[in-house]
Amino acid sequence: MRCFERIMKNYICFSLPCILDPLQFTYRPNHPIDDAVSHVLHTALSSLDISWGNYVRMLFIDYSSAFNTIVSPLLVNDTVVVGLITNKNKRANLEEVEDLMKWCQANCLSLNVSKTKDLVVGFCRTRQRSYTPFSSNGAPVETKYHTYTPIRLSYSNTIETAQKMLAKWFCFTFWWACHLQFSQVISEKQKLGTPEECKNAGFIPGYNLAGEGFDIVKMERKGSFVIDTRKWNKQDGNCILIINRFMNKVKQKLPVAVVDWRARSQCSMKVASRLYESSESLVNDSTSSVSDSWKAGLDIPNVAGQSYGGTHSREARFAMKKSKEDKYSFTKHEVTCSFYSFRVINKPPLHQQFVQAVTTLPKSDNVKAYQELIDTFGTHYISKVTLGGMMKAITSIRTCKATMSGLTDTAVKDCLEVEASATYKSATLSSELQHCEALKRKMGLRRGFSSEFRERQTKVMGGNINGEHLLFSGKLHPNALKTWVESLKTIPDVITYSLKPLHFLLDKKHPARDRLKRAVEKYIKDYALKNVCSAKCRIGRQCNPRDRCACVCNRSRNIHSNCCPAGRGLATLRVYGLRAKGLYGDVTTQTDGSVKVSYGSIIKRTEVINNNDNPRWPESFEFGPIQVSMGTNLKFEVYDADSYWNSDFLGTCSVSLRSGTVSDSCYFKYGAFFFSYTVQCAPSLQGPQCNEYSPSPMESSLAKIFHSRNGILAKDLWKLELGRNYTDELRMKSFKEKEFSHM
């Protein structure tokens, strides 16, 4: 353990030279705790002599819960925040305390307020000052005051109090360094390069990815540059050079427009998954890779049931096209690996092409001219990026088809995640893997879930790849996966980003700024997706709190809560039109006929029709939900009922059911029997035995108007209203014609 601590210490000392605090004695050899305490006390108390009225504030913190570390017994002890208050300026000290409180909250640490103390030390000619106490979760921290006049300088109590608490503070510095290291907050080495060095150095990887315009509606980079990212030389001809530790510590230059460049590896290759119950919910989440700040500076309202941005993205178009063909749910699986990040300065140098395009804009609200600018440069520009690579797959699941196979959408999502995770890790959770294998055996699936559910859109961003779909087939191409990850260091792509509206690049007094803002707002609002239910439920009702257009049914052995049949062969059976001809029952009188109708264990009987050899039974029998199978027949038995206990059997016939309406007959020794029945397959089923899957597409007339199954673009709402009015006119015309015909 001691060796490990020394190795960690040496590594941290090497990695963090730029952010060492003079009071962090952990990094310095041959300095005991007494030295640290003495140095801190000397620094704190001597600071009081700089100017009259200064005071030192020390917040000694005690945790009520701590974390696991290699020296956990020490780290549960006190932490101290030391601040020198000069000229009544308490801002720096308050910010330090606030930052520490935020860090505690982020790391699930809570404070023991009863042991946390605030020590204030200072000189004062008059009476003691009052200081605003610190608080944690609303509970105030006790503040101890030690103020002295310049004549009576008695430090003993103060030093004794501080010494006891600062003895523990020395241990905290080692933990804080570990926290910085493992959080990978690395201060990148930068230097000012000479003109000659700058000319010979290459740009940082992905330097121009923040210079392109971005279309928030289509969620795509436009390929046209709005920011000049090739300008690197400052006024004196120098540039900023960085050392890229991911490329053999080569020196690379930063564009003038780029700041806060960081090289940090976050490449756990963990598969993230998410389930969307409709295409509309997927569209609503399509801007998830962008921070919510993209609406800042734009008058975009928050309207319930309406999605702005991403409505024409690649994955949205895939999902919405599918939704018109059948009832689908969607899963998203993705793996990310990032290496770099940077942001753009507030006033970056603009690209010459963008400047020329803006200059030629008319001084009036010319919709066409501004839309052409948006088509070329987009609606936003990228202000902050995380670079690396991503593999993403959107898988569409025919909801009812999966349900009839005994699967839920969640089970499919989870098993796809298990298969993808097996690609990037040597082992997955055995319980999840065993569960998915059991499902495969139960469903009789010979292939994996990724092969069974293969209606999929895949996308690989960044790196060098030769067309392999590595997300679910990485085991087949192990070398390709390693090559791809390594290539991300030199050929990264944008994974996550922050956006700012395009008009932010123009000066506030620029004549085109407000017009460009209005044009961007109109474009985004026109292509907003409004949630409109395209049809009523065939069964069930629309009461899903997450999706108001989704149909919900009362779960039974035949139907699931999503209104999908529980299995194949489900149907309803109606028997009617029963009659006979030429029956011969009694010798002296005509037949007193009745019919017994049965399907499986369900039995129905007609009333007796007396003295009639050619009876017509008026009954219509509803058998309710049944299971159509080859082994079960619809059976008819005809009797001559002389009494309840004495009936003569006249004949029987048995037929195999098939879907649709069927009229048939069978012949007895004396006479013939005629019958009709209708078998209606349950929703999402078809075929003679109702055992084939049947998709549920939208009506063709609505599919032309709607953008998705239950979504219509704001700019197309007039088409829907026009269609409804036309339908109402046709209905009214038909009603009047019927009234006229009856006059």
Image: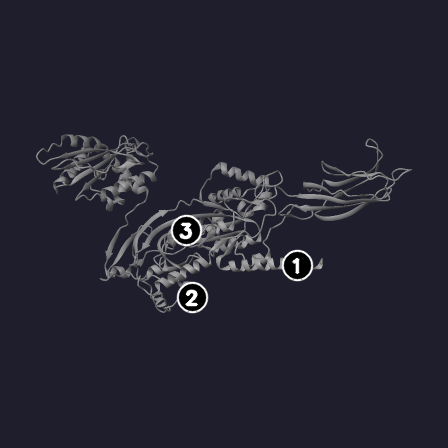
Distance from disc 1 to disc 3, alpha carbons, whole Å, reads: 56 Å
**Residue 521 picture location, percent across and down:** 41, 59
Q: Closer to the camera, 285 or 197?
A: 285
Residue 291 visible, this orientation: no
Left or right, 296 with respect to 14, comes to right
**Residue 399 picture location, percent across and down:** 56, 46
Name the residue that disc number 1 marks: 736
Whichever of labels 1 and 3 marks the residue nearer the N terminus, that label is: 3
Amino acid on which the number 3 mark rests in the picture: Ser
Name the residue that disc number 3 marks: 289
Is label 3 or label 2 in front?
2
Residue at 42 percent of width and 45 percent of height: 269
Is label 2 or label 1 in front?
1
Q: Are marks 1 and 3 in contact (CB under 8 Å)?
A: no
Distance from disc 2 to disc 1, alpha carbons, whole Å, reads: 46 Å
Name the residue that disc number 2 marks: 367
| Quadrant where the image shows the N terminus | top left
Residue 19 visible, this orientation: yes
Q: Residues within 10 Å of mark 1 (few under 14, many from 20)?
A: few
**Residue 56 picture location, percent across and down:** 18, 38
Amino acid on which the number 1 mark rests in the picture: Lys
Q: Are marks 2 and 1 in contact (CB under 8 Å)?
A: no
Q: Residues within 10 Å of mark 3 (few under 14, many from 20)?
A: few
**Residue 544 picture location, percent across and down:** 53, 44
Q: Residues within 10 Å of mark 2 (few under 14, many from 20)?
A: some
